[in-house]
Amino acid sequence: MSVSTSTGTPAGTAGALALRLSRHPVLRYTLRRLGLTLFLALGVTVVTFVLSALVPIDPTVAALGERAAADPEIVAAYRAKYGLDQPLVVQYWVYLTGLLRGDWGMSQQTQRPVLEDLLSYAPATLELVLATIVLAVAVGVLVGLAAALYRNRFPDHAARVIALLGVSTPIFWFGIVMTMIFFAQLGWLPSGGRVDPNLPKLQGGTGFILIDSLLAGQPAIFWSGVQHLILPSIVLGLGTLGLIIRITRASVLEVLGNDYVRAGRAKGLSGGAVVRRYILRSASGSILTVSGVAFGGLLAGTVLIETVFNWPGLGLYAYRSATTGDLNAIMGVTLFVSTAYILVNLVVDLCYMILDPRVRLA
């Protein structure tokens, strides 16, 4: 084994990489989390494929229809063409290699590649989820902070009621009630869709209505997009709001009793400065973790909300796929949402590592 003449450390590529990793805990932690992420993504493909095989829907019948599926020769030709006559392990390998090549199969309801469908529907869902999480975190942190600072007083009691309603109210019922009040009775907000259909359509762009309308200089479309986002984002974020209020309140109460907070006040710092420098910074780890988990939950929970508000996103696409037995589309949505959930948690873990140096040393 060759040895460096200057430091006496291994000079090979593997040895140099190991030495570099040992000196950079952040890089070592990041690579370890990336490896775990790839492993989880592979596990998701296995679970998704096995569950799809257990679904009591014959993909041949769903694709060909009842009349064509009654002909044995047509069925045999179809199964041979798509490898459905092969063992399950072989089918999984074909499925996995197809995913890596960008071939996610064809959707029977749209007659387009599933990946193309997912990329066209995903911006609507992501725009809704991002608006929801931003609204829930902003309001939840403020209410939770007020509840902790005014413990056992009116703001605390009000926050507890809001949190309880948030985690216990069925969102389907809440969506219908909100639509009846703000659309049917008051006429303040639209009941569904992403934008007023009478406005000119945006061509190309990112698929995000708010961003594309700003880039195109269309304030009317931007305002219409905001109005259409309000009701579904409030309904979708109600449960997350209650959770963040509870976590923020508990985290702030825990921090308030620490010596460094009392020391900050003893130094003459204002209440706002103590909150910014000590309380929110110490409580941010718990809030960030909950927000990341909630983001994944919101992605998976859009099916109901997008159905209620006719929101043209992945949830509505998944609902229509399930009702038509479109297995390729169902598998695609499941895999897409699961992968997004894993990636969001990876980003949250990396942010948590930056906020808390103890994590990178663990």
Image (tube, rainbow, N blue to C red):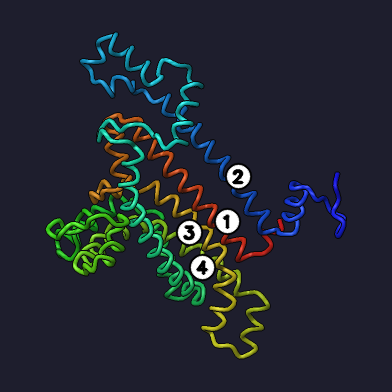
Q: Which mark is residue 45?
A: none
Q: Which of 347 and 55 is in front in this view?
A: 347
- Mark closer to the chain start, 1 or 3: 3
Q: Is mark 3 on a helix, strand or loop?
A: helix
Above or below: residue 208 compared with residue 304? below
Give the residue at mark 4: 249
Question: For this view, does 103 lie left or right of residue 2?
Answer: left
Q: What element carries label 1?
A: helix
Instruction: Give the amino acid at mark 4.
Output: Arg
Q: Which residue is drawn at 48% across and 63% down?
A: 246
- Mark closer to the chain start, 3 or 4: 4
Q: How crowded is mark 3: few (under 14 residues within 10 Å), some or many (20 or more)?
A: many
Q: Residue at x 47, y 27 (%)?
A: 50
Q: Residues within 10 Å of mark 2 (few under 14, many from 20)?
A: some
The answer to whether marks 1 and 3 mark residues whose Cβ atoms lie closer than 8 Å is no
Residue 162 appears in the figure: no
Give the residue at mark 2: 36
Give the residue at mark 3: 291
Q: Nearer the viewer, mark 3 or mark 4?
A: 3
Question: For this view, does 158 lie left or right of residue 269?
Answer: left
The image position of residue 319, as x and y in percent, is 29, 39
Instruction: Give the amino acid at mark 2.
Output: Leu
Label count reads: 4
Give the spatial CA distance, label 2 vs label 1: 12 Å
Q: Which of marks 1 and 3 is in front?
A: 1
Q: Nearer the viewer, mark 4 or mark 2?
A: 2
Q: What element carries label 4?
A: helix
Instruction: Give the amino acid at mark 1.
Output: Asp
Residue 218 appears in the figure: yes
